[in-house]
Image (cartoon, grey):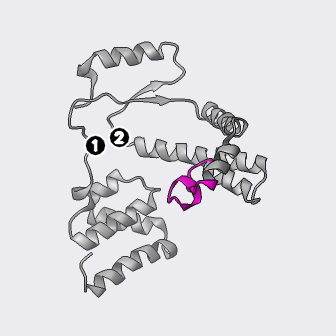
Amino acid sequence: MRTGNLETCLRLLSLGAQANFFHDDALREELRRVDPAAAEAIQDNNIRRIIRALEVVEITGRPFSATAPTKRYRRPSLVIGLRDDWTALTERIERRARAMWDGGLLDEVRRLDAAGLRGGRTASRAIGYAQALGELDGRWGREEAIADTARATRRYARRQESWWRPDPRPRWLDATAPDLVQVASDLARRPTQWTP
């Protein structure tokens, strides 16, 4: 940010404040006005990113879309994504969260805590570790910690889905298809199917 530009600083502060006071539609409309390409690329429900785009326009005087990374690889590449039924994925997430506790996560976190886990900036907040620390601290019981781990993992899966949705590069395959491995192998053997 340019130093000494109090007016710009106040406008940027007001962007964040506007999100609290004005309907999200007003922020989306402002982005459409100042940077239509960014407004088209950013999902309507991603208010944080809409505010960030407005901030970039305000600070740089250039469209956010001009500074956004392109979704292109340096070399032809193959990215395979697996799609699954959300209900089935949710059930797997819940089983996995319970399996983490059954597999000794609490003991692992207890050992890591003794070695300084809480001093790290990210590990102590990782899904599973944060909930295990909560159980060790007495904030949660075992079942609550497992349930919160599953909830946080479902939220993370939704964020991943939102992240990848607008990206044209992945080749999405059905995770339950009986010929999944064969289809993926066929794609890998045909570089003409790869993303430039």
For the residues labelled 1 and 2, say whether their Cβ atoms are less than 8 Å apart: yes
Nearer the N terminus, badge 1 or badge 2?
1
Residue 157, compared with residue 13, is above or below; it is above
Confirm whether the magenta stretch covers residue 12: no
**Which quadrant, please, contains the C terminus?**
top left
Q: Is residue 130 left or right of residue 8?
A: right
Q: Say which residue appears at 32% left-offset and 34% top-offset.
A: 169
Q: Say which residue appears at 40% left-offset and 60% top-offset.
A: 49
Seen from the viewer's position, the closer of residues 138 and 32 is 138
Q: Secondary structure at mark 1?
A: loop
Confirm whether the magenta stretch covers residue 121: yes
Q: CA distance from mark 1 to mark 2?
A: 7 Å
Q: x, y percentage for residue 129?
A: 62, 50
- Residue bearing the label numbered 2: 167
Q: Is residue 177 left or right of residue 98?
A: left
Q: x, y percentage for residue 79?
A: 35, 30
Q: Secondary structure at mark 2?
A: loop
Seen from the viewer's position, the closer of residues 98 and 166 is 98
> Looking at numbered disc 1 in the image, what kind of residue is underneath it?
Lys
Disc sitting over residue 177 in the figure: none
- Residue bearing the label numbered 1: 71
Residue 149, compared with residue 45, is above or below; it is above
**Which quadrant, please, contains the N terminus?**
bottom left
Q: Is residue 22 left or right of residue 64?
A: right
- Span colored in magenta: 114-128
Q: x, y percentage for residue 48?
A: 44, 62
